[in-house]
Image (cartoon, helix red, strand yellow):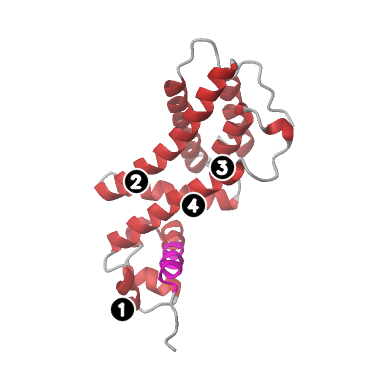
Amino acid sequence: MPKLVDHEARRRELAQAVWRVVQRDGVERASVRAVAAESGWSAGALRHYFPTQDALLHFAMDLAAEKFTERARALDEHGVPPQEHSAPWRVRRLLTTLLPLDADSKVSAEVWMAFVTRARVDPVLRAAGRKGDEVIADWLLERLRDAAEEGILRAGADPVREALRLLALTDGLVVHGLITPEAMPPELMIQLLEDHICEVFPGCDLST
């Protein structure tokens, strides 16, 4: 019987190798040959799945957006204390997953930033980046609209504008956390994010 091959699992394995190369060497060095060496594959075998560097990068960025969506959904499903089910806590929980707060999240942020930089000159990567932003913005907008109906959103606040402001603030914290970590350490990133969330949701309590 011929050996069954999980092609999707192999593609994901290669995408993870792309992330490692991008994080270590930069996006421009994530060539088919470099990723093949990183993954232990031959360049010929890798080209069976991704014939070009662009194809590799596009799949890796799409997968990054998909993994984030799965992680965001899981945040509201498992192991959350009852007192942290409020809209402010749910927003805090989602946005802190984007911040470079430890070694793992720093790698994720660095890889995503490298892709975003490349996306300026790559329309396919730019579209993938927009898709990732839209996933986060839509999730935030849903929480904010629910909060407005509950009467806990700041009086007169527009949920659409507030969702965009939260996303822009988080993006800025990520950039400063990566570029000037000595001036923007994890505890300051979290405090600034919490300060803004409590402006959006007056009277919120994010203390644990």
Q: Is residue 137 magenta?
A: no
Residue reaching furthest to the bottom: 1
Helix, strand or loop status at disc 3: loop
Give the spatial CA distance, label 3 vs label 1.
37 Å
Q: Residues within 10 Å of mark 1 (few under 14, many from 20)?
A: few
Residue identified by numbered label 2: 117
- How far from the left and from the top, in percent, is residue 198? 61, 21
Give the spatial CA distance, label 2 vs label 3.
20 Å
Side of 109 relative to 47 (left or right) = right
Q: Residue at x 30, y 44 (%)?
A: 127
Q: Please report whichever mark, 2 or 4, sits nearer to the chain's N-terminal start.
A: 4
Which dot, 1 or 4, sits closer to the camera?
4
The residue segment tinted magenta is: 6-17
Residue 186 falls in which quadrant of the image? top right
Side of 197 relative to 125 (left or right) = right
Q: How many marks?
A: 4
Residue 199 falls in which quadrant of the image? top right
Residue identified by numbered label 1: 44
Residue identified by numbered label 4: 67
Helix, strand or loop status at disc 2: helix
Q: Please report whichever mark, 3 or 1, sits nearer to the chain's N-terminal start.
A: 1
Residue type of the residue flagged with mark 1: Gly
Q: Please report whichever mark, 2 or 1, sits nearer to the chain's N-terminal start.
A: 1
Q: Nearer the viewer, residue 198 or 178?
A: 198
Q: Please report whichever mark, 2 or 3, sits nearer to the chain's N-terminal start.
A: 3
Q: Are marks 2 and 1 in contact (CB under 8 Å)?
A: no
Question: Can the viewer see residue 122 in this picture?
Answer: no
Q: Residues within 10 Å of mark 3 (few under 14, many from 20)?
A: some
Residue identified by numbered label 3: 97
- How far from the left and from the top, in percent, is residue 21? 42, 62
Q: Residue at x 61, y 48 (%)?
A: 102
